[in-house]
Amino acid sequence: MSTRRIHAFAAAFLGFAAAASAQTIQFVSVTRQAAYVQTGATVSDLSADPTTPFRFRAAVEGDSGTTATNPWTAVTVTPPGGSATSMTFNTGDKQWQFEDTTPTSMANLNATYGTGGYTFTPTGTPSGTATVTVGSFAASLLNIPLLTLSGGSWVGGSYVISNTAMLTVTFNAVFTGTPGATDGFHFDSRINGSTSMDGANDFANWDPTTNAAANYPSTPPAFIVGAGQLAAGSYTIEASYDDIQNPASVYGSAFSASLFELRTTVNLTVVPEPAALAAAFGALALLGVFARRRLLVA
C-alpha cells in the first residue's frame, strides 16, 4: 500500500473511529500488494505492472504530532519465524515504514511474507509489542479492479478523451462470493497528474466500529469527472481494493490489520478538442487511402 493509500484507508477508518484521534499512534498495518495495468476494456487486458508488480509494506501511522522521537525513537517489525527489521521514520508522512518491492511473483511474495503474526516492537511510550496477523491469499474473495470508462476510447493501451468531454469510470465488484461475518473490504480510486482527484473511499461489507459485516456497498460508486476539469496531458487512474484481515485494537484505541491489496492502473490521455478532431479526421483520411488502394488493386 502506498503512503497515500495508507492515509486514505486510515482516514476512512478514523471517520468511524473518532476515539483513535485522541492518541498519537493511529494505525498499524501489514500490506501485501499485487499491482496491475489495464490496457483495454476487458479482463484479458489486465497484466502485471511492469515496474513494481508486487510489494510488501509494514507501517505505523501517527498523528500530526508524531516525530522520529515522539512518542517512539525506534520501531522494528519481525515476520513469522524471521528476524527483526528496523523501520524508517518518514517525517512528511508521520509514519514508521518498511517496504520491500523485490518479490517477483505472487508465490514469491507469499513465501517471503507468509501467514502468521508480524510483531511490531517500539522504543518509547506506549511500550509493548503489537502483533498483526496475516491471513491466507488463497482464502481471499478479493477481485482485481476492472475499470469501465466512457467519454473517450481506448487507443494503443491508453484511454484517450477530449478535455471537453465528461469522463465516467465505473468499477466491478470489490469481492466475489459470500464473505463471512468478519470479512471486511475497502476501496478507493484516484486520478494522478497535473490535476489530482479522489474518487470514493469507503468500506464494503464491513462496519469498522464493530469489526463485523454491515450493509455497505459491494461495488464502488462511479467516479465522474466533469468536462473541462482535466487539462490536456497525461494522467493515471488508480483503483485499489483491500481485503481487511484480522482487524484489532492495539496501543489503546489504535487500529491494526493485515491488508491484501489488488491495484489497477489505467493510463489516461486528455487531448484538447482540436487534437481530438484532428485524430478523427486523420483516421478517416487513412481509411480513404486504404479504400483507394483496394480500388487500384481491383
Image: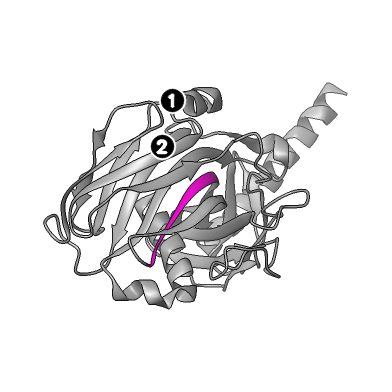
What residue do we see at 57% from left, 58% from top?
186
- Mark 2 packing: few (<14 Cα in 10 Å), some, or many (20+)? many
Tell me whether circle 2 and circle 1 mark residues in contact (CB < 8 Å): yes
- Depth check: give the residue in front, 298 or 159: 159
Q: Say if residue 193 shows up in the picture.
A: no
Q: Is residue 140 left or right of residue 197?
A: right
- Mark 1 packing: few (<14 Cα in 10 Å), some, or many (20+)? some
The local secondary structure at tag 2 comes to strand
Question: Which residue in the protein does label 1 denote?
Answer: 112
Question: Which residue in the protein does label 2 denote?
Answer: 56
> What is the magenta segment's predominant secondary structure?
strand
The percent coordinates of residue 35 (x first, y second) are 52, 39
> In whole angstroms, how far apart are the C-alphas of marks 2 and 1?
9 Å
Q: Magenta part of the protein: which range?
A: 253-261
Give whichever of discs 2 and 1 has the lower sequence position: 2
Q: Is 124 within the magenta? A: no
What residue do we see at 40% from left, 56% from top?
6
Above or below: residue 244 compared with residue 22: above
The percent coordinates of residue 42 (x first, y second) are 73, 42
What residue do we see at 50% from left, 47% from top?
259
The percent coordinates of residue 189 (x first, y second) are 53, 59
Q: Amino acid at mark 2?
A: Phe
Q: Quadrant of residue 139?
A: top right
Frontmost of labels 2 and 1 is: 1
What residue do we see at 35% from left, 65% from top?
252
Above or below: residue 85 compared with residue 283: above
The local secondary structure at tag 1 comes to helix
